[in-house]
Image (spheres, grey):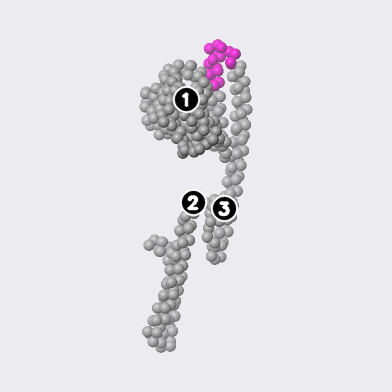
Amino acid sequence: MRILWDYIKGKGWLPALLGLCTGIFALVLSLYDLQAEAAGYAGLLCLIVLSVCAVWDFVQWRRRLVYLESITGQAALLLHMLPEPRNLEERIYRELLSELNEERRSAVSALDARLRESVDYYTMWVHQIKTPIAAMGLLLQEDESPRGRELATELFRIERYVELVLSYLRLEGPSTDYLIRMTALDPMLRQAARKYAPLFIRGRVSLDLRETGLRVLTDEKWLQLVVEQVLSNAVKYAPGGHVTVRCKGESLIVEDDGVGIAPEDLPRIFDRGFTGCNGRMDKRSTGIGLYLCRQICRRLGHTITVDSEPGRGTRVTLCLARPRLEVKD
């Protein structure tokens, strides 16, 4: 009923035309003293023709309306999918839409170019920082003193933060280099464990790394980043505790017996820049680690969930299942 009323409001000429025809017939009838029955037949015939035309016009209007509703939200495809203009007014509207679409494309292209330029600049800047960090790491390898080991640990953290920034820039950039293939999970876990071994030793955290035997369809480099970030959080917030890495079905589980996460913080831990109570106490949390993990998992078709209880620890579950595909190594 609402659609019919919208049509009538948009076709105000129909009632006017009907009234005009009625007036003409009444005038002719009075001037020429025609029989009312003959005039009534003529008027009824005109009314039938007018009704048929109105119904046909309504059907065409309704068809165009349904089609326009079906392409709503497809702005990029909108212009060439629109029905052909039927009159000068629709043609002018079509030209106006074309101009607006062209301006939108130009603005998006300019924005992408600026974003790409910014990402390239900061990526180069981060790479420049990594060079002196690597040089300092080589120098500290020769220093076996407690102070040297302390400096090496802090340098490792700095290097980790630099890698996070670089990954953030790449992930937020206009393009990302994904290489999806079947990947063995165990070598990836062992590599992450070796990388974070100094932090486990310094924090007196024991690690129970169990064989998974899993092969997953993923991007090895980006999933490695997720695993390392989850492992980094586990060792950071479980000093003197225990971390277990195991699998359950096609899910990888990393759990610790550390400080846990406050219930009010748990819904926001994947928000960008959110550090929570633990991050504020640590004073070194960036608030982008878990955000990156969530974004990477979404793009790889994985899911990441966190369960935690203050004082009892945290469990992170990476569901690595994907649709079954035949992929050749």
For the residues labelled 3 and 2, say whether their Cβ atoms are less than 8 Å apart.
no
Q: Which residue is mark 1?
A: 231
Label 1 neighbour load within 10 Å: few <14, some 14-19, many 20+: many
Q: Nearer the viewer, residue 90 or 191?
A: 191
Q: Amino acid at mark 1?
A: Leu
Q: Which residue is mark 3?
A: 101
Image quarter hosting the N terminus: bottom left
Q: Amino acid at mark 2?
A: Gly
Q: Which residue is mark 2?
A: 73
Residue for point 38% across, 31% down = 264
| Cα distance in 3D space between marks 3 and 2 | 14 Å
> Is any atom of residue 133 visible in this view?
yes
Q: Which residues are magenta?
A: 140-156
| Cα distance in 3D space between marks 1 and 2 | 41 Å
Q: Position of residue 201 (x, y in %)?
A: 48, 16
Label 3 neighbour load within 10 Å: few <14, some 14-19, many 20+: some
Q: Position of residue 44 (x, y in %)?
A: 40, 78
> Is any atom of residue 168 visible in this view?
no
Q: Amino acid at mark 3?
A: Asn
In the picture, the disc for residue 283 is: none
Please determine whether, in this image, residue 235 is positioned above or below residue 70.
above
Residue for point 45% across, 35% down = 321
Quadrant in the picture for residue 240: top left
Relative to 310, 175 lies left or right: right
**Callout 1: helix, strand or loop?**
helix
